[in-house]
Image (tube, helix red, strand yellow):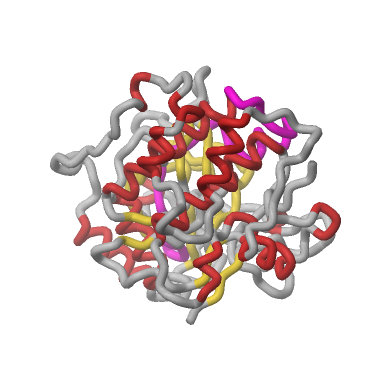
Amino acid sequence: PRFSRGRAATRAGSPAPLALAMASVSTTEHDLKYEPCDAKNLGQGNFGTAKLMRLRSTGQLLAIKYIERGDKIDDNVKRELVNHRLLDHPNIIRFVECLLTPTHLAIVMEYAAGGELFERICSKGRFGEDEARFFFQQLISGLEYCHHHGVAHRDLKLENTLIDGSPTPRLKICDFGYSKHSLIDSEPKSTVGTPAYIAPEVLSHKAYDGKAADVWSCGVTLYVMVVGAYPFEDPSDARNFRKTIARIVSVNYSFPTNVALSEECKDLIRRIFVVDTARRFTIKDIKSHPWFQRNLPAELQNAVTNDGPPPSEMQDLDQLMRVVDAAKTRGAAAGAARGGGDFYPDDDDDMMDGSGQFSGDYEQYD
């Protein structure tokens, strides 16, 4: 099966080359602490390019996302950082800190050497139920933690779930660019996300429960893992977002007859794909379902809450806010400071799909 990659919000025109002028070594805290170790981009997320970097003091590999200073540093970026900073869980990419370069805001995060779960699915076509369950259990564990701390992700998808490099791979939720906090932020009502994963209520232009919408997206993820295709896309017209959305609203999907699935697995998916959020399975319901319970690792049997004081190494919130506010000021012109620490990522070619069209998320605000 062919999958279309959901990336950042769709943009018109050709992507401009991203010149990441970091000035000379020793001029910024960023350059004192981190050095590039790979010329290849890790990927393109919401509004930024990620690079593999090395902590000079220890050699630890980290992922750093760079967002151009100026107008791109808006309330969504601030919300992403504030929400992500709160989350300390084995199944969530760890936020480290954010710093300024002369031209960009640099967001430092844990590096997941195994790449995207999306790529693993593409290479295999689909997973057997045991492998799908192994990753789905971890996804639910991480999401339960997010929700416990008031954070709805709102853009869960295979591309936003990474895998570490351990022999027994650990799933890591990433990219909180569309996230909302139930206490800090307004009630979700914007239509954001990736069409194949979006819940029906998100399309209503009314306030909705972001946590219930996350559960729907988990159902799509599970379906893709075990079937090898998106549940609400027309295989003969997969790029037709309007048709996909119509099928989502009417819950028009089926289980292919050529894929052997257990009744328990299909039952769980059916209980997630329910339009009425009052009747849709919750995370608690999912965790009690027989299919989910099978071979559940001991470390996932109890919820990880981490309700204690934040780690001492966590970047101070006031400091983070000062960095973000400073990043709203446009930095030096690209190429203005090309010293020994300069770094220029490749053009963002991976925003283009095979047809020459941008592969983008669905984003519409009221």
Count of labels in the image: 0
At 20% from the left edge and 53% from the top edge, which residue is drawn? 316
Residue 90 visible in the displayed image: yes
Q: Residue at x 38, y 50 (%)?
A: 30
Q: Quadrant of the N terminus?
A: top right
Q: Is residue 249 left or right of residue 148?
A: right
* Residue 38, position as x, y percentages in the image: 58, 39
Location of residue 134 with respect to 46 vertically, above or below: above
249 relative position to 30: left or right = right
Q: Is residue 343 above or below residue 104?
A: above
Residue 215 x/y as whole percent: 46, 50
Foreground residue among 319 and 35: 319
In magenta, the rendered stretch is: 102-130
Tell which of 63 and 365 is nearer to you: 365
Q: Is residue 43 above or below residue 312?
A: below
* Left or right of 28 in this view: 46: right
Could you say which quadrant of the image residue 240 lies in? Answer: bottom right
Give 103 or 136, whichever is nearer the viewer.
136
Residue 85 at x, y = what percent?
A: 30, 51
The reply to whether the magenta stretch includes residue 188 is no
**Could you tell me which residue is drawn at 30 percent across and 63 percent down?**
323
Q: Position of residue 227 (x, y in %)?
A: 70, 37
Outermost residue on the left side: it is: 309
Q: Is residue 310 above or below residue 360?
A: above
> Residue at 51% of width from left, 52% of height from top?
216
Which residue reaches farthest bottom? 366
* Residue 99 can be seen in this image: no
Is residue 108 covered in magenta?
yes
